[in-house]
Image (cartoon, grey):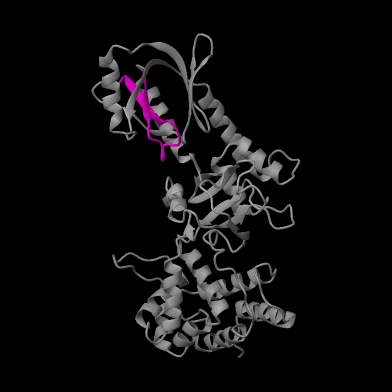
């Protein structure tokens, strides 16, 4: 009886095709993705369930057994262990599927994907520890056949951009990336909005260093600055990252929204754009791409949701504006209660009926009598908000004279409203606004 598996047959087909092409295999190769997907399926088939250190079952993912094997056999598989460590240290990856995909790409480049497979295929007790008997790697004959295909793959010439890993958690589909070196400067002229851990570029200042060659566009993702990975943890630290290499050329790694020389967009970034940012931003990004369609059809439902939410918030809340008071160089939430009491004790407080609006990019307060704008602050300038339990009818927010992460002067704006539920809604809306904050660099 012939022993075979359709996945191995498919893998042989993609390997043969790449071998016959006899060319250097780069990220743009249309067959690379299919080879990688097939490899992932072969490794995933029949992975045994295992327990974590707390005794709970792990999701059956090949990353876990490869990690465990490398830890146990670090001296026998030292080269492979170093790859595992490199993947674990990659801040762009948050999930085990993403780490496993990066491991596959690194192993293809280093020609060592066969190494862990050979180790467990030649050690039957290990193969049955990690895999079910009806799997490829749990079957002695299928394991040998799979190993022979991997040895053939190791002879192919891969040249892959391993920095292009930010979206492997979501998909095998790879975006187009560019690495840029810019002249030394204090400000790049880029504003980003963090959404789902990615720094989405939402504005480029005209005539800025970042905008001068046209390679960076609205809708791209700022992936790295001077080798520092830019994720949610970098919120408010972008200027500090820039200062570390003051006076030196600035290197950027950009994940592009559009593929090179094409109107085709990268799906995962399109999903980020429609998830948390405004319709205006979507239209600006599409305009930058030369599209005449105001909003992509597959994003229309998300855009309608954003419109509805914005319309609701823009209606505003009728509250009384009491005035403002300086908090000096401090803008944290601990200053809220002090500011409210200091204003009330000063005798300068007033009660002006206003409309308090939480907009997409900031706060606007207009006088109810004539719609005159009393104040307007972007979320970038607002450092904190809250109220005090002792006098819950009063709430406030604090804003800096510039972006709050670099501001040196702060002022508290105090309001009065007897509807506790609406005060909570205002403070929650301000909190959500902080999540949409744009950070300039």
Work out which quarter of the rendered image holds the N terminus and state it. bottom right
136 and 231: which is toward the camera: 231
308 and 380: which is toward the camera: 380
Q: Quadrant of residue 68?
A: bottom left
Q: How many marks?
A: 0
Give the image location of residue 190, x and y in percent.
56, 45
Q: Is residue 151 above or below residue 321?
A: below
Please tell me which residue is depicted at 42% across the width and 78% down the height of the picture.
81
Q: Is residue 112 above or below residue 168?
A: below
Q: Quadrant of residue 3?
A: bottom right
Q: Relative to residue 296, is residue 328 drawn left or right?
A: left
Give the image location of residue 350, x and y in percent.
36, 11
Q: Which residues are magenta?
A: 392-416
Q: Is residue 93 above or below residue 1?
A: above
Give the image location of residue 293, x and y in percent.
74, 40
Task: Find the residue positioned furthest to the top.
Answer: 369
Q: Is residue 366 above or below residue 424?
A: above
- Inspect this view and state whether residue 138 appears: no
- Inspect this view and state whether residue 89 appears: yes
Give the image location of residue 260, x and y in percent.
71, 58
Please tell me which residue is depicted at 54% across the width and 41% down the height of the picture.
276
Q: Quadrant of residue 301?
A: top right
């Amino acid at each position: 009886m012939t022993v075979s598996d359709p996945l191995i047959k498919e893998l042989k087909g993609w390997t043969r095709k790449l071998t016959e092409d006899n060319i250097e295999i780069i990220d743009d190769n249309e067959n690379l993705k299919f080879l990688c997907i097939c490899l992932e399926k072969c490794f995933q088939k029949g992975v045994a369930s295992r327990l974590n250190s707390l005794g709970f079952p792990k999701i059956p993912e090949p990353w876990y057994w490869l990690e465990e094997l490398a830890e146990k056999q670090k001296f026998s598989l030292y080269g492979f262990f170093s790859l595992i460590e490199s993947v674990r240290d990659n801040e762009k990856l948050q999930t085990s599927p993403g780490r496993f995909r990066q491991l596959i790409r690194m192993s293809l480049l280093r020609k060592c994907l066969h190494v862990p497979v050979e180790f467990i295929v030649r050690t039957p007790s290990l193969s049955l520890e990690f895999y079910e008997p009806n799997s490829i790697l749990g079957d002695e004959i299928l394991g040998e056949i799979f190993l022979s295909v991997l040895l053939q793959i190791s002879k192919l010439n891969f040249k892959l951009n391993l920095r292009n890993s930010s979206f492997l958690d979501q998909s095998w589909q790879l975006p187009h990336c560019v690495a840029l070196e810019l002249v030394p400067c204090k400000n790049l002229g880029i504003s980003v909005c963090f959404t789902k851990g990615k720094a989405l570029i939402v504005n480029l200042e005209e005539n800025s260093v970042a905008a001068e060659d046209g390679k960076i566009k609205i809708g791209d993702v700022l992936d790295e600055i001077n080798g520092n990975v830019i994720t949610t943890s970098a919120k408010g630290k972008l200027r500090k990252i820039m200062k570390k290499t003051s006076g030196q050329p600035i290197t950027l790694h950009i994940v592009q929204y559009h593929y090179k020389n094409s109107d085709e967009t990268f799906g995962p970034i399109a999903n980020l754009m429609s998830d948390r940012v405004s319709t205006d931003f979507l239209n600006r990004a599409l305009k930058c791409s030369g599209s005449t369609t105001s909003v992509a059809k597959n994003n229309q439902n998300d855009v309608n949701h954003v419109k509805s939410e914005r319309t609701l918030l823009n209606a505003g809340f009728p509250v009384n504006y009491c005035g403002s008071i300086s908090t000096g160089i401090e803008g944290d939430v601990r200053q809220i209660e002090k500011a409210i009491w200091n204003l009330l004790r000063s005798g300068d407080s007033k009660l002006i009926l206003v409309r308090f609006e939480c907009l997409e990019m900031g706060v606007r307060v207009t006088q109810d009598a004539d719609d005159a704008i009393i104040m307007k602050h972007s979320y970038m300038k607002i450092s904190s908000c809250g109220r005090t339990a002792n006098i819950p009818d009063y709430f406030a927010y604090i804003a800096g004279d510039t972006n709050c992460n670099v501001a040196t002067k702060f002022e508290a704006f105090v309001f009065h409203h007897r509807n506790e539920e609406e005060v909570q809604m205002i403070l929650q809306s301000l909190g959500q606004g902080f999540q949409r904050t744009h950070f300039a660099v």
